[in-house]
Image: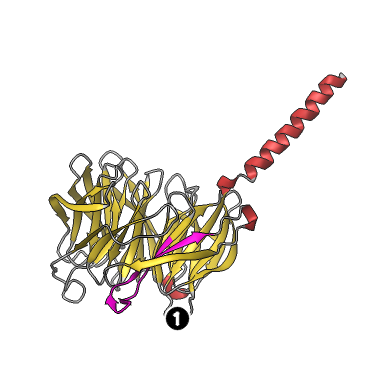
């Protein structure tokens, strides 16, 4: 072998080693996992973990920020800021919860502390806000006030501070369940995939209220028709769109079911297809559903059962939107509330509120079935899970 050839071979081996190492340590594989909680018992606020997607390794970072009932979280598209709804009834003597804005510590890689610093807070304009999400431009945060029975939109400044609401809608009405549906209870709101409409899920009204959303002004205007109806007493809670944008799925808390809708993006209308149960036929106990998500690949849908304490897994027919139950998987705890699919699409994290733990499952890419991993996170009263990339 000639000297030049040896040099070339040595150079090639060194380049390959550097390339593999760089790929392994790529920032795209580094994430923070934030956990929103209820703080009536042991919790102090928002907790953080470091997550390596390449190895699935999780490192506890402790309390990210002390806060009162930061039940649901949202990350802005720049990954620089975290937002929380503080699920409380009173704020500055008003019947309102709080929307809080935090700056995320921007140290890189393994130096990431997971700490967040409060920037500011504003009134949510309704009691007990329970959901927050960004529009597709990242310039507005949309909030659902559960007890207040209202929805609101808040502009977000480039420096992360959140402004006073640009839109507010008070829902009106009731439904057949006198204990849970005596009035409106907005539980979820997000914009549609094209950002032209916003859909609010109201448990108290058995309705999906559709608004035309103006991304320039942050305004909400009732669509025509203004809503889609669920079965009386269904108690719709959360909604998930299929990646193809043609179907939407609503998990019904009071009925323990999922209703599939065909979605017309040109008109912002929802056409009800079919409702299926999230429970096995022989289950006779009490149950409330909580969360629903479609896998990024579009082949599977997951929903959480509180009472049966399982994740129900369904396969999806991408042409018709039809759901077929695959199986139920125990969540290794009580009252599984929110759950989240990790950024790789390989793992599912389930927040068990009443047993203070987060169970981690491997997702079978062929059939969506869940296999419990050896990792279990201990967090007091976990409610919401959000990943953010470390850049």
Quarter-wise, where is residue 71 in the image?
bottom left
Instruction: Look at 32% across and 71% down and name the residue there.
Output: 97
Is the residue marked by circle 1 packed among few (<14), some (14-19), or many (20+) residues within 10 Å? few
- Please give the name of the residue rendered at 18% of the width and 71% of the height, measured from the top-left corner: 181
Q: Is residue 259 visible?
A: no
- Does the magenta portion include 195? no
**Image side of residue 160 versus residue 196, left or right:** right
Residue sitting at 20 percent across and 39 percent down?
A: 266
- Please name the colour scheme applied to the rendered image: secondary structure
Q: Position of residue 251 (x, y in %)?
A: 28, 59
Residue closer to the observer: 322 or 57: 57
In-image side of 43 versus 129 (left or right)? right
Q: Is residue 220 visible?
A: yes
Vertical side of 319 occupied by 333: above or below: below
Q: Dot 1 corresponds to which residue? A: 41
- Count of number-bearing discs: 1
Q: Which part of the image, by quadrant, shows the N terminus? A: top right
Dominant SS of magenta comes to strand
Residue 261 vs residue 69: left or right?
left
**Picture quadrant of residue 24:** top right
From the top left corner, tell me how far across and down residue 390 is, in percent: 55, 51
Q: Is residue 10 above or below residue 105?
A: above
Question: Is 280 displayed left or right of 3 in the figure?
Answer: left
Measuring from the top left, give residue 170's x and y in whole percent.
Answer: 19, 65
Could you say where residue 184 lies in the image, as x and y percent from the top left? 19, 68
Magenta stretch in the rendered image: 83-104
Viewer-closest of 339 and 301: 339
Assign a secondary structure to mark 1.
loop
Closer-to-camera residue (201/378): 201
């Amino acid at each position: 072998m000639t000297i030049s050839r040896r040099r070339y071979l040595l150079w090639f081996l060194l380049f390959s080693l550097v390339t593999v190492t760089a790929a392994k340590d790529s920032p795209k594989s580094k994430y923070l996992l934030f956990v929103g909680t209820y703080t009536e018992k042991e919790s102090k606020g928002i907790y953080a973990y470091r997550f390596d997607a390449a190895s699935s390794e999780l490192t506890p970072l402790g309390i990210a920020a002390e806060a009162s009932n930061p039940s649901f979280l949202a990350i802005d598209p720049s990954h620089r800021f975290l937002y929380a709804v503080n699920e409380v009834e009173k704020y500055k003597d008003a019947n309102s919860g709080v929307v809080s804005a935090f700056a995320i510590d921007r140290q890189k890689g393994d130096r990431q502390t997971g700490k967040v610093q409060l920037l500011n807070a504003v009134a949510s304009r309704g009691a007990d806000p329970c959901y927050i999400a960004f529009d597709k431009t990242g310039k507005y945060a949309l909030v659902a006030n559960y007890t207040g029975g209202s929805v609101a939109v808040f502009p977000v400044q480039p420096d992360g501070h959140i402004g006073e609401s640009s839109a507010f809608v008070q829902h009106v009405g009731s439904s057949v369940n006198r204990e849970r549906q005596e009035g409106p209870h907005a539980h979820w709101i997000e914009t549609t995939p094209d950002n032209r409409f916003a859909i609010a899920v109201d448990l108290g009204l058995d309705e999906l209220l559709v608004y035309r959303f103006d991304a320039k002004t942050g305004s909400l205007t009732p669509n025509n028709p203004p809503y889609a109806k669920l079965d009386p007493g269904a108690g719709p809670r959360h909604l998930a769109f299929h990646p193809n944008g043609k179907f939407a799925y609503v998990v019904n808390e009071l009925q323990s079911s999922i209703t599939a809708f065909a979605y017309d993006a040109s008109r912002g209308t929802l056409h009800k297809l079919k409702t299926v149960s999230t429970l096995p036929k022989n289950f006779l106990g009490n149950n409330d559903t909580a969360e629903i998500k479609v896998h990024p690949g579009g082949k599977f849908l997951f929903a959480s059962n509180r009472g049966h304490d399982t994740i129900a897994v369904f396969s999806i027919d991408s042409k018709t939107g039809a759901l077929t139950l695959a199986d139920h998987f125990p969540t290794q705890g009580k009252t599984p509330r929110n759950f989240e699919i990790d950024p790789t699409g390989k793992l599912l994290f389930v927040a068990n509120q009443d047993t203070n733990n987060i169970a981690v499952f491997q997702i079978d890419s062929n059939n969506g079935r869940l296999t419990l991993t050896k990792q279990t996170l201990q967090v007091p009263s976990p409610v919401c899970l959000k990943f953010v990339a470390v850049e």
